[in-house]
Amino acid sequence: MSNKTLVIRADSDNFEEELSKAASIIKEGGTVAFPTETVYGLGANALDPDAVKKIFAAKGRPADNPLIVHVSSKDQCEDLAEDINQTAFRLMDEFWPGPLTLILKAKKIVPEITTGGLDTVGLRMPANDIALELIRMSGTAVAAPSANTSGRPSPTSAEHVIQDLDGKIDAIIDGGIVEIGLESTVVDVTGDIPVVLRPGQVSAEDIKECVGHVEIGYTDRTLEESETARSPGMKYTHYSPETKVILIEGRPENVKSTMTELITNCHKEGKMVGLLATEETSGSINADEMFSLGKRNEPAQAAHSIFMGLRHLDSKEIDLILVDGTLKTEGIGAAVFNRLRKAADEIKKV
Ligand code: TXA
Ligand code: MG
């Protein structure tokens, strides 16, 4: 593990040269964080077990949680997966490059450490030029989980990656703030009917429209040890700030009055409260810190803001974070609620 992390800025004059340096680091078995359209990823050569080990070490990630393998072309999939069916090909054609990970039967070439010991592998072709160029130049497939410390909110800027992983990885490519703000949709396409294991910008409805059917295979809570997880990630606490988080769902008037009451009570005890809320909800509420989720009917704005907002509020001297659950649940809204419910220590339905 390195103790000096090289920071490469996408707007620097010699970016091409720097990018090839980053690709060499991956070729030589090192770790490089890079932007994608969803969140920043922490990359290493997916086919080199020693390199992949460094990702798990830097993040403190449980060994049975598999990594998504990133490719720069659809053709590259044939080297990594077998029995790729028509459903998978259609989804690739429709959504790649883009925020969709396909779970396929793994070829032997993919090491166990990358698949978390499963016989499947998650493949994704990201819609980000820096990511695609890095993968292409490194001449291999790149395993990359989100570039955060395990359990913390996913990073949507290079600063977030630096907060968590500075000194623990070899390089970071700073490509500014990401476009979407939450992770890709994960879909199991090993059977006839695609099963959504993690919601994202590509919605279940989008998938159904493309291939005719879809099943939902996720819940919005962390699974118990005794439950079977179709995706190992479902068993682990996610997206959590250190500050206590309460998500309040229900009719807007009820959400507002519950928030006001909780804030009043906290203030009586000398406690400070942060608010992660839509414009419509936050208008009339007096919290000590505030981060906007944008407009209630535009969940894409919330998707872009939730991880940034949770990190921002967590860095403030506050005792409680209240989250507004009045957002629209359609489209990417389902993915926003999934992340918020998992981040919450408590959910109040009012
Ligand atoms: O948008 C994204 O997907 C980002 C960027 C960097 O591409 N990556 C990402 O990776 O979110 P990560 O490791 O934080 O989340 C991967 C999720 C985990 O929940 C993991 O359990 C699941 O995908 N997963 C990976 N391979 C799997 C497999 N073979 N079967 C089932 N689930 C799998
Ligand atoms: Mg992650």
Image: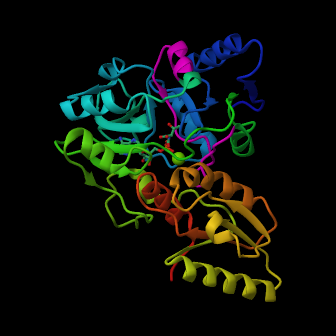
Q: Which residue is drawn at 52% across and 69% down?
A: 326
Image quadrant for the N terminus? top right
Location of residue 212 (image quadrant): top left
Q: Which residue is drawn at 25% across and 46% down?
A: 208
Q: Which residue is drawn at 45% across and 38% down?
A: 67
Prevailing SS of the magenta stretch:
loop
Q: Is residue 151 magenta?
A: yes
Residue 190 visible to the viewer: no
Q: Where is residue 191 in the image (x, y as percent from the top left)?
A: 19, 42
Q: Residue at x 73, y 88 (%)?
A: 265
Location of residue 288 (image quadrant): bottom right
Question: Of 142 and 73, which appears nearest the observer?
Answer: 73
Q: In this view, does 38 lie above or below 218?
A: above
Q: Position of residue 112 (x, y in %)?
A: 39, 35
Question: Of 234 and 35, which appears nearest the observer?
Answer: 35
* Colour scheme of the picture: rainbow
Q: Give the range drawn in magenta.
A: 132-157
Q: In this view, does 224 lie above or below 7?
A: below
